[in-house]
Image (cartoon, helix red, strand yellow):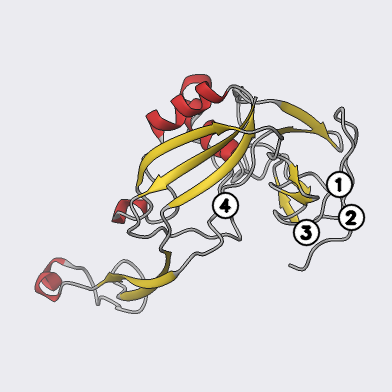
Amino acid sequence: MNFKITFHLDGCGIYYDENEPLHLDGLIGYCLAPMQSKKLNFNRDEAPDVDIKMPLLRSKINGHDVWHASALFTPEQSPETLRYWRKRFNQDRVHLSQGKPSLKSGVYRDYNTPIQLMLINKLYAYGSGNRKSVVKLLKKNIKSLGKKRAYGYGKVVEITSERIDKDSSLVAGGVAMRWLPDSDGFRVVRPCPPYWNRVGAIPCCEVGDCFSYKPFNAPMSRRASSPR
């Protein structure tokens, strides 16, 4: 079944980098990892102990398995604002520190870092597979999205889904909807989650690159890339 998932946000802002987009299968993998993996704490250079099984269709593209799950997209109109992530050294507690505290580096460093927030009320993604199972997993485990979630940004208030006629999880309108294996791609990343892991990383196209494929899971090939 082809479907569209919509994450409804509280509208207070989300810290979301469209150059490093979340992927729907990445979120599902996060939900399922505690149930399928015995090795949850490992670094980027260690191979995952299991290949997480998901309620999604899977295809082989250019010799690599890829889940039918797109990246998360923002609405066309996405106003932005700035907030600041601040930390100040509490001088009243200086007598508890050792040595000479440096306010420019180390644990005592002061900073006032700008955070670019998108003032949007939803994110959406496409997938193909068991829609009800996907929505159930997401509703149970995903409460917020993006970075700086502990500061209250990116809160998810509702998750809805709808059936669609066409599979838009991999390619739609000749454009890649997710990272797809591509020998000419500039991004080196795993074709399946966990995407932060380096083991098995290969060249992939960017989300939004022109990409064509033949039906019946035939090898895919990318046309000339769209402007980056």
In the image, residue 168 sits, relative to residue 39, either above or below, namely: below
Q: Position of residue 89 (x, y in %)?
A: 21, 73
Q: CA distance from mark 4 to mark 3?
A: 21 Å
Q: Look at the numbered discs 1 and 3 and tell me whether their residues touch, using CB distance below 8 Å.
A: no
- Mark 1 or mark 2: name the one nearer the start of the chain: 1
Q: CA distance from mark 1 to mark 3?
A: 17 Å
Say what amino acid the circle numbered 2 marks: Arg
Say what amino acid the circle numbered 4 marks: Phe
Q: Is residue 63 left or right of residue 161?
A: right
Q: Look at the numbered discs 4 and 2 and tell me whether their residues touch, using CB distance below 8 Å.
A: no
Task: Tell me if I can see residue 194 in this picture.
Answer: no
* Mark 3 closeness class: few <14, some 14–19, many ≥20 residues within 10 Å: few
Q: Look at the numbered discs 1 and 2 and tell me whether their residues touch, using CB distance below 8 Å.
A: yes
From the image, tell me which residue sits under label 3: 186
- Mark 1 or mark 3: name the one nearer the start of the chain: 3
| Residue 41: assigned label | none
Q: Nearer the viewer, residue 71 or 164?
A: 164
Q: How many marks?
A: 4
From the image, tell me which residue sits under label 4: 73
The residue under the point 30% across, 56% down is: 151
- Mark 3 or mark 2: name the one nearer the start of the chain: 3
Q: Position of residue 200 (x, y in %)?
A: 73, 39
What is the quadrant of residue 162 in the picture? Answer: top right
| Residue 212: assigned label | 1
Q: Nearer the viewer, residue 156 or 101?
A: 156
- Mark 4 or mark 3: name the one nearer the start of the chain: 4
Determine the secondary structure under disc 4. loop
- Mark 1 or mark 4: name the one nearer the start of the chain: 4
Say what amino acid the circle numbered 3 marks: Phe
| Residue 223: assigned label | 2
